[in-house]
Image (cartoon, rainbow, N blue to C red):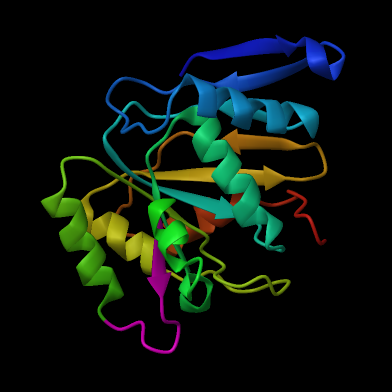
Amino acid sequence: MTQYSVKLPSFKNRKVVFLSIGDAVPKRGNRFTQTIARSILALFGWQLVGEFPNQSKMILIGAPHTSNWDMVLGMVVIWALKLRAFWWAKQSLFRWPHGGFMRWLGGLPVNRRISQGLVPQTIKEFERRQEYVLVILPQGTRARGAQWKTGFYHIAQGAEAPIVPILFDYGRKIMTFKPAFHATDNVAADLEYLQSLFVGVRGKNQ
């Protein structure tokens, strides 16, 4: 996918690299909201690099997840790309009075105590919709060394949706979008490969 850079004079001509997304990718927002989001990224020195598949359905997985700031950063990136995406978050974040706003942003509440049925329900959503981009943090928790949950992988298998790994590198302030990966029948090998992409990537709190 094409990359390009912009110069923002208000930030001392700091040069920041962004991605662009293709016509097939579901979009949301406008030039104004995109400029605001890109300005925020520029202010804090973040760059978006790599490849973004020009497809209407996919699962984006982000790691390492070590801070609540990961979600804030992710939302800014979504608006910077003008991407229409949905994302999982713990149910407690959707309480009144901000629950409606979280859903408007694309949030989908998940009850961690009752997670049965989430995978088949999500697969049905992929089948029902013509466009669907889902963002999942496979670690599920901010605890260091947390094991990946495999729900995203089984959804990708069932929905035949590509997996796009996203590296949150706070050390270099670079968010890297890796090439789309298609699940095979070898679950162990696939997970080992995906996790290997994140080795050495520095989270905010590590």
Please say whether residue 104 is visible from this viewpoint: yes
Q: Is residue 192 above or below residue 80?
A: below
Residue 112 colored in magenta in the image: yes
* Coordinates of residue 200 in the picture (x, y in percent): 75, 50
Q: Residue furthest bottom?
A: 113
Q: Magenta region: which residues?
A: 106-116
| Residue 201, horizontal then vertical, whole percent | 73, 48
184 or 165: which is nearer to us?
Answer: 165
Which quadrant: the C terminus?
bottom right
Q: Residue at x 70, y 32 (%)?
A: 41
User: Which residue: 33% across, 51% down?
Assistant: 183
Numbered marks: total: 0
Residue 68 lies in magenta, yes or no?
A: no
Which of the 4 image quarters holds residue 175?
Answer: top right
Q: Quick check: 129 left or right of 181?
A: left
Q: Nearer the viewer, residue 162 or 20?
A: 20
Relative to 117, is 58 on the left or the right?
Answer: right
Instruction: Give the residue at x 51% y 78%.
Output: 92
Q: Quadrant of residue 159?
A: bottom left
User: x, y (%) of residue 60?
Assistant: 44, 47
* Residue 80 % position (x, y): 55, 30
- The foreground one among 195 and 76 is 76
